Amino acid sequence: MYPGVPHMPVLHVGSSTMPSRLKRFYGNHDLHFLAFSCYGRRPLLDSPSARNVFLDVLGIMRQRHNFLLVGYVVMPDHVHLLISEPEESNPSIVVKALKHRVSADMIEIRRQENSGDGSGGGVLPHFWLPRFHDFNVYTDEKKKEKLQYMHENPVTRGLVKFPGDWIWSSFLFYVTGQPGIVPIDLVD
């Protein structure tokens, strides 16, 4: 039973590549704070163009899977999202589709950039680590906490001095109301 939320359906995910104790809680229309990392924690999203590719794909997946995007930050080696549960699937399906499309797009871009230079394409065997972290957010206090954590992440990592200087996050929307690279959905 999930603390404070009665009768929450549970999806248990387990395989040889995932710990058997991993549990995801879906079906109660919570927000989900998601985190996933690049393969080997390498900075595969270290360029503005790579981060823009991720956000373009995020916009496509948001429309395709019909979920609300409440917050995001794209870091050089990982991503944080705060999303609603999609109407006809779940966050696991969204993350799988998002990772697959970003990976395919980035591998193709790398292949084109490196073709003919003798580097063999510079393509990694994988773009993402296989797992992702999923935390149910069902109070306004937790939503604010997770948004603050995301928005402070570029400052904490020493990438910028102020959260608003990192354009690959939802921070400026919450401060100025202006849409960023990907529009944000306000939820109560």
Image (cartoon, grey):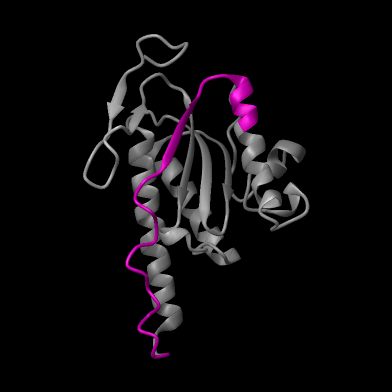
Residue 102 quadrant: bottom left
Q: Is residue 17 left or right of residue 99?
A: left
Q: Residue at x 64, y 38 (%)?
A: 149
Q: Residue at x 52, y 63 (%)?
A: 43
Q: Is residue 140 left or right of residue 57?
A: right
Near-viewer residue (138 or 64)? 138
Q: Position of residue 113 (x, y in %)?
A: 46, 79
Name the residue furthest left.
16
Q: Position of residue 109 (x, y in %)?
A: 43, 72
Looking at the rendering, in which quadrant would you find the C terminus?
top right
Residue 176 quadrant: top right
Q: Is residue 133 above or below residue 57?
A: above
Q: Position of residue 89 (x, y in %)?
A: 32, 32
Q: Residue at x 71, y 50 (%)?
A: 155
Near-viewer residue (138 or 66)? 138
Q: Residue at x 63, y 35 (%)?
A: 147
Looking at the rendering, in which quadrant would you find the N terminus?
top left
Near-viewer residue (6 or 170)? 6
The magenta region covers: 117-145
Magenta stretch encompasses residue 182: no
Q: Is residue 115 left or right of residue 167?
A: left
Q: Is residue 102 above or below residue 8?
A: below
Magenta stretch encompasses residue 123: yes
